[in-house]
Image (tube, rainbow, N blue to C red):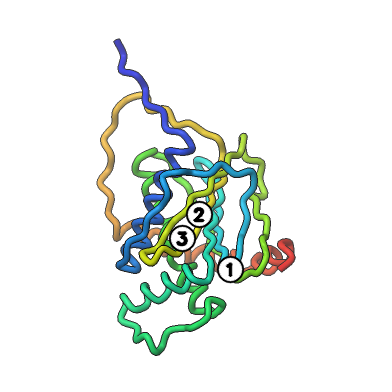
Amino acid sequence: MAAKSKTLTTDDILVLLCGSVKKVLTTATQTDINYSPMVQKITRTCLRPDIGCFVIFDGGFSGLVIMNFCAQSAMEIYRAYMMSMGMPESELATQHTSDEVGNMLGELMNQIVGDFTGKVGHELMVSINQNQPKMLAINKEVLVSIDTNLDRAQARRVSFTTERRSVFYMELAMDKTEFIKLHDFELEEVDPDRIVEEVSQRTVATTARDDLVDQDLLDELGI
């Protein structure tokens, strides 16, 4: 009798993404970052105050990742990251609206999605590409959707907590999809340095193109 095939769903992909958020932020800040085991189904994805960041990916499947930070969680992650890099506390930004805070969160978002795309390619044998993350300091909700028709779109929201119990959220919208494993296969060895290098190369290649459309995007969002 043939072995029963294994099916991976949208929520299994969400677990991969949550793992990337936890791994990257824990490593970057050298603090404990955790996420709730309870996932919320939502009907729309939004950028929310005080800082929202989003990135779109496509390829084997399409999706949108949004991360929303309150001022407190943004500053805690920013300070922990910069101080772990050796930055004196006296030289740190003091407001969440500072460019330094937004740039740092955008950099971490890029690393998170880069780690996620690496996992997808490694474990699902599917290639996806990401665009350059966009960071916005906002004081009201902004609805964000992908300018393509997703196949039976699904959206999820996951709550994360920092070491000091500050809360931030990640939202994922993507195709409703299933990956069916027909037979066993050997996973390729993952080289973290190679993944980081590939993400950097893609970032450089897409930054110039994305910069051309940034203003049009912000105009469309009414910001």
User: Which is nearer the N-term, disc 3 or disc 1?
Assistant: 1
Name which residue type carries label 2.
Met
Q: What residue sits right under mark 2 in the picture?
A: 170
User: Which is nearer the N-term, disc 3 or disc 2?
Assistant: 2
User: Disc 3 to disc 1, how far (Cα)?
Assistant: 28 Å
User: Which is nearer the N-term, disc 1 or disc 2?
Assistant: 1
Q: Nearer the viewer, mark 3 or mark 2?
A: 2
Task: Work out which quarter of the rendered image holds the C terminus and state it.
Answer: bottom right
User: Which residue is the extreme one toward the front?
Assistant: 165
Q: Where is residue 161 in the image (x, y as percent from the top left)?
A: 42, 59
Quick one: SS at disc 2? strand
Q: Which mark is residue 202?
A: 3
Crowding around mark 2 (Cα neighbors within 10 Å: few <14, some 14 to 19, many 20+) is many
Q: Residue at x 37, y 77 (%)?
A: 82
Crowding around mark 3 (Cα neighbors within 10 Å: few <14, some 14 to 19, many 20+) is some
Task: Work out which quarter of the rendered image holds the N terminus and state it.
Answer: top left
Work out whether residue 214 can be spotted: yes
Q: Where is residue 177 in the image (x, y as percent from the top left)?
A: 52, 33
User: Disc 3 to disc 2, how far (Cα)?
Assistant: 23 Å
Q: Which residue is drawn at 71% across and 65% down?
A: 216
Quick one: SS at disc 1? loop
Image height check: is 43 above or below 144? above
Q: Which mark is residue 50?
A: 1
